[in-house]
Image (spheres, rainbow, N blue to C red):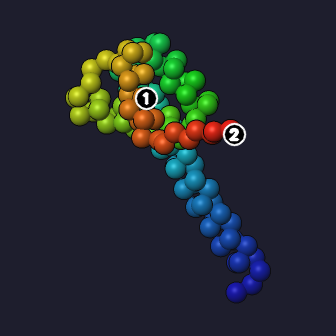
Amino acid sequence: MDIEELRQRRAAELQRQLAQQQAEAEAQAQYEMQKESLLKKVMAPDAKSRLTRLKLANPALAGKVEQLLIYLAQSGKIQRIDDATFKEILLKIRGKRKETTIIRK
């Protein structure tokens, strides 16, 4: 084994890794496009804008809500979500949190 052979092997390995990363990125982008398409089809414009604002304020919660909406839409439990229904869903999800109150004396 000489240095040139090692370089060629390393270059081939790097090319395989790059191809794999590109394939993963492409699959992720395709998933995101399908998700956005489904959410756009299921949600009213005002509910969609509320979800967009939620993504900016709380990305983790927005991700949970998106997964829930996708599941409900794919299972046929929802047809169209308006802003009032979306608010109810958010309240149910957020209602699981404990409220903390501070009492000053």
Closest to the observer, 41 or 104: 104
Q: Is residue 99 left or right of residue 89?
A: right
Closest to the observer, 86 or 66: 86
State whether residue 9 is above or below residue 28: below
SS category of the residue bearing label 1:
helix
User: At label 1, which amino acid type do we have?
Assistant: Leu
**Does residue 31 show up?**
no
> Residue 7 is drawn in which quadrant?
bottom right
Q: Is residue 69 left or right of residue 26?
A: left
Q: Which residue corresponds to mark 2?
A: 105
The single residue placed furthest to the left in the displayed view is 76
Quarter of the image with the N terminus in it:
bottom right
Check disc 1: other Cα within 10 Å, few if <14, some if 14-19, many if 20+: some
List x then y, in percent, for residue 17.
60, 61
Q: Which residue corresponds to mark 1?
A: 90
**Sequence-earlier tag: 2 or 1:** 1
